[in-house]
């Protein structure tokens, strides 16, 4: 077995990366750098090979839990957490590099996009949709799941999400499991609060949709949001 100390210094992964750049390194070498060290009697290169062999694909390795990683001899909790953090950064970079964009101009466009994800839910779910400065929807997420009749969501959570993703504007949508898209008093009050908060933060609330079984209500179209980037 070849130990790292037996490899000429100029051929070791770190030194090769410094001289030739990361593109010159194999997957095993890059993983070895992330690991930092091997275990007693086993080089870091060999440990990297064992990890790749154990999980089969890079995708499986990226999605492995801390517990699964520590099942490999030589990977303790600290090293497993370090690997997970490295993989998380890579996944986030990939998300930033590839953001499918959907042109959104009207409340109907928002409904057509989000309804398939919400209308058949058995509990109330709140979804956020984020738009860029060109009006393209580039991100959506479920912010909360409640009971059959209500879900609790705080404006802080809404705008934290929007700020984190650097959105130019946002829209909310939630379903009514009863099938009736009529907004409740609480829906209207939350919408007004979010619209006011959005104006103060410079991230306007474009709309808040109530999704029913066969129809929807736009609180922008209903006049509860005074300014929106929708047409």
Image (spheres, rainbow, N blue to C red):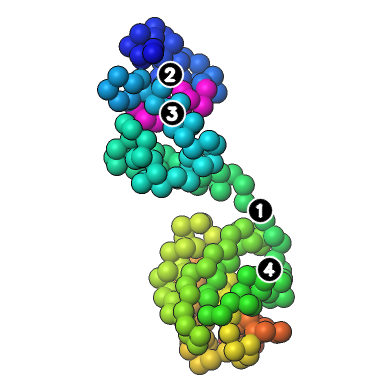
Question: Majority secondary structure of the magenta segment?
Answer: helix
- Residue underneath mark 3: 50
Q: Is residue 50 above or below residue 85?
A: above
> In this orientation, which residue lies closer to the viewer: 217 or 48?
48
Q: Give, as a single range, the part of the protein colored magenta.
A: 26-36
Which SS class for mark 1? loop
Note whether residue 69 is visible.
yes
State which tag comes first along the sequence, 1 or 3: 3
Which SS class for mark 3? helix
Seen at 66% across and 53% down, the residue is 100
Disc 4 or disc 2, which is closer to the eye?
Answer: 2
Q: Residues within 10 Å of mark 3 (few under 14, many from 20)?
A: some
State which tag comes first along the sequence, 4 or 2: 2
Separation of marks 3 and 2 at Cα, in angstroms: 17 Å
Magenta stretch holds residue 34: yes
- Residue underneath mark 4: 113
Where residue 96 sits in the image (x, y, percent)? 56, 47
Number of disc labels: 4
Disc 2 or disc 1, which is closer to the eye?
Answer: 2
- Residue underneath mark 2: 13
């Amino acid at each position: 077995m070849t130990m790292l100390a037996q490899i000429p210094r100029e051929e070791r992964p770190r030194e090769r990366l410094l001289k030739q750049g990361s593109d010159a390194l194999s997957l095993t070498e890059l993983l070895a750098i992330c690991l930092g060290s091997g275990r007693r009697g086993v080089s870091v290169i060999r440990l990297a090979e064992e990890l790749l062999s154990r999980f089969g694909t890079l995708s499986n390795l990226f999605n492995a839990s801390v517990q699964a990683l520590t099942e490999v001899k030589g990977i303790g909790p600290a090293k497993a957490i370090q690997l997970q953090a490295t993989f998380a950064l890579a996944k986030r970079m990939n998300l930033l590099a590839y953001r499918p964009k959907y042109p959104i101009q009207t409340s109907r466009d928002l409904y057509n996009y989000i309804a398939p994800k919400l209308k058949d839910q058995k509990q109330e779910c709140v979804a956020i949709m984020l738009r860029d400065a060109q009006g393209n929807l580039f991100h959506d997420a479920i912010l909360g799941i409640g009971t059959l009749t209500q879900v609790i969501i705080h404006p802080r959570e809404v705008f934290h999400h929007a700020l984190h993703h650097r959105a130019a504007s946002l829209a909310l949508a939630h379903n009514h499991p009863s099938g009736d898209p009529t907004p409740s008093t609480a829906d209207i009050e939350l919408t007004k609060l979010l619209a006011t908060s959005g104006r103060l933060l410079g991230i306007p609330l474009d709309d808040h949709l109530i999704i029913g079984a066969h129809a929807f209500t736009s609180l922008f179209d209903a006049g509860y949001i005074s300014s929106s980037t929708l047409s």
